[in-house]
Each structure stands twice: as C-alpha cells, then as structure tokens.
Image: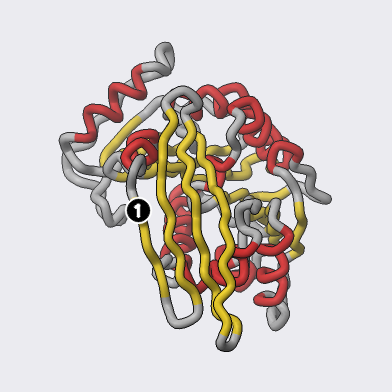
C-alpha cells in the first residue's frame, strides 16, 4: 500500500509528540531575523495540515500541497472552522504549480527525503524558487545520511488505545535509500484492521542540497554555531568562506560532530542548521 494511505487517519495520534507550534515559532525566529513579514505562503508536503493551520491562524494566506489525498482530506476537515482557511492542493512537488506567487515556502518533517530521484528533488527546489516572490523565503528540513543509515535494522513501536504501529528500517547503500515497512493495526469498534505501508527516504548530503540550491539561485557559504535551543548564539562564532569550494561543507559538518551542536549556514539570507548530525534545516531566500 502507498505511504500515507491507511496511516492518514491515525497520523495525528501517532505524532502527538511533535510540537508543531514550536516549529512555527522557530520559523518565526528566522523570519524575524531576515526581516521578512510574509502575507502569503505555501506549506509543501503539508500532510494533515498541522503547520498549515498554525500559519493560517497567524493571518497568512496559505496553500497546503501534498501528494496524499487521504492526508489532505484530514487537513481539510481540521481547517473547517478557521476564519482564514487554507487552500489544499494535491500535487507532486517536482511538478509544483501555484495559482499565485508566495512570500514564504516551508517543508517540514524531512518531506523532501521522500523524493527518491535526485533529479526530481532538484526540480522541486527549482519550482519552489519559481513560485517565490522576490525576497521570498524557503525553509525546509531533511534527515542527514548519518541518521538514515543508523536506522538500518532498527525496529520502532508506537501505540495508543486506537492504533498500534510497528516499523522496521533498512538502508540500501547501493540506492542510498532508507526503507521502512510499517505494520499498522487500527481499531474500528471491537475489530482491529491490519494494513501495511512502505515508506522510503533518500539520503541527501549537504553537498547535494547546496548544489540544488545553487542551481536554483541560492549560494550559501557561511557558518556559525548556535546552542541546541536555537535561541542563544554561543560566544565563539566561526565564519568559513565556501564561495569557491562547496565540497568543504561536508568537512564543516564533520567538524561539528565532536561539538554536538547545531550548525547554521548563512549567506544572502540562506541558512543550514545541522542538529547534532540528525537533521538539516535549510533556509533560502529568492533575491
């Protein structure tokens, strides 16, 4: 079964530990720093719309885009009572087209990793650039290759009174893809229904992502360090010029592993945040 089909109705229950409000507050910190006050936005791979709705509640006219009709149905139901409801659209990100330009694009929870063909990922980033208004900002996060490789052979379990989910991870070095088969048991009255979904994520390196951003018009090349809370900059700040050699970004990431600190990359409004070798968060600005 396709990913996020049967899972859609139970997704919010299984991710109730995700603090979406904190995610949006983090976005706001970045926007404040960049002096951006978006009036319009798109939430890419929006899923059940948790981030979309929070941004809409801030008064932003927002479009939610996702490939799963089932997830979008849940999102639409959640948005019914909003005074400023989002527009939800079923689209593949590599074929992204919007009815209007936007000031902000976000893509949360490693959703770009689900694009398994690097050419499609590069095209998705290029299309995001095209839909951004001049000065618009794009923020997204992906899992690091280190995290996805570490999932090989791991088994994860999540449950509550209405749903039981167990999934097993495997990493294929030849394809650079992490796959995890998910067995899902969902209660319907006195009956439990079992379904299976396979989820796959491509392990994009920082070098690849920088290349895609660069090709789309983004050129990051400066680093400094922040504390894991992302709120306080530590006293020692390191700036490294990567204007001539993008491959050195991998070296910078390796250097941060011993510090166990996130890393922020900025140039012309662009930012990487590598959180302890687990997640990259990337910010790009259309100039």
Q: Residue at x 38, y 19 (%)?
A: 242
| Residue 241 % position (x, y) | 35, 20
Residue 172 lies, with reference to residue 231, above or below; the image says above
Q: Residue at x 41, y 50 (%)?
A: 168
Residue 87 lies, with reference to residue 136, above or below; the image says below
Residue 149 in view (yes/no): yes
Taking the view exactly as shown, the residue that stands out farthest to the right is 99
Q: Residue at x 20, y 46 (%)?
A: 234
User: Left or right: where does residue 156 sit relative to residue 68?
Assistant: left
User: Left or right: where does residue 211 sit relative to residue 94?
Assistant: left
Looking at the picture, the colour scheme in use is secondary structure
| Residue 14 % position (x, y) | 47, 69
Residue 85 lies, with reference to residue 100, above or below; the image says below
Residue 89 position by quadrant: bottom right
Task: Write down the residue under mark 1.
Answer: 155
Residue 56 lies, with reference to residue 99, above or below; the image says below
| Residue 114 % position (x, y) | 57, 42
Q: Secondary structure at mark 1?
A: strand
| Residue 144 % position (x, y) | 39, 37
Q: Nearer the viewer, residue 116 or 277?
A: 116
User: Left or right: where does residue 198 sit relative to residue 143?
Assistant: right
């Amino acid at each position: 079964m396709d990913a996020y089909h049967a899972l859609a109705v139970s997704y919010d229950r299984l991710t109730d530990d995700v603090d979406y409000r904190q995610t949006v507050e983090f976005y706001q910190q970045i926007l404040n720093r960049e002096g951006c006050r978006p009036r319009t936005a798109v939430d890419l791979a929006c899923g059940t719309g948790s981030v979309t709705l929070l941004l809409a509640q801030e008064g932003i006219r927002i479009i939610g885009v996702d490939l799963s009709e089932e997830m979008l149905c849940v999102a639409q139901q959640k948005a019914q009572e909003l005074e400023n409801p989002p527009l939800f659209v079923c689209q593949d990100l590599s074929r992204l087209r919007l009815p209007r330009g936007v000031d902000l694009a976000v893509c949360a929870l490693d959703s770009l990793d689900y694009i398994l063909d690097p050419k499609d990922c590069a095209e998705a980033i290029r299309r995001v650039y095209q839909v951004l208004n001049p000065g618009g900002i794009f923020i997204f996060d992906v899992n690091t290759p280190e995290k996805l490789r570490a999932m090989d052979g791991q088994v994860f379990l999540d449950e509550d009174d209405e749903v039981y989910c167990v999934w097993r991870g495997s990493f294929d070095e030849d394809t650079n893809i992490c796959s995890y088969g998910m067995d899902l048991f969902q209660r319907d009255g006195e009956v439990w229904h079992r379904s299976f979904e396979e989820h796959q994520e491509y392990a994009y390196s920082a070098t690849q992502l920088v290349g895609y951003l660069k090709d789309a018009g983004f050129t990051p090349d400066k680093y400094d360090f922040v504390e894991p809370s992302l709120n306080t900059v530590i006293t020692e700040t390191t700036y490294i010029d990567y204007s001539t050699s993008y491959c050195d970004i991998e070296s910078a990431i390796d250097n941060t592993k011993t510090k166990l600190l996130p890393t922020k990359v900025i140039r012309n409004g662009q930012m990487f945040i590598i959180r302890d070798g687990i997640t990259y968060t990337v910010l790009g600005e259309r100039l």
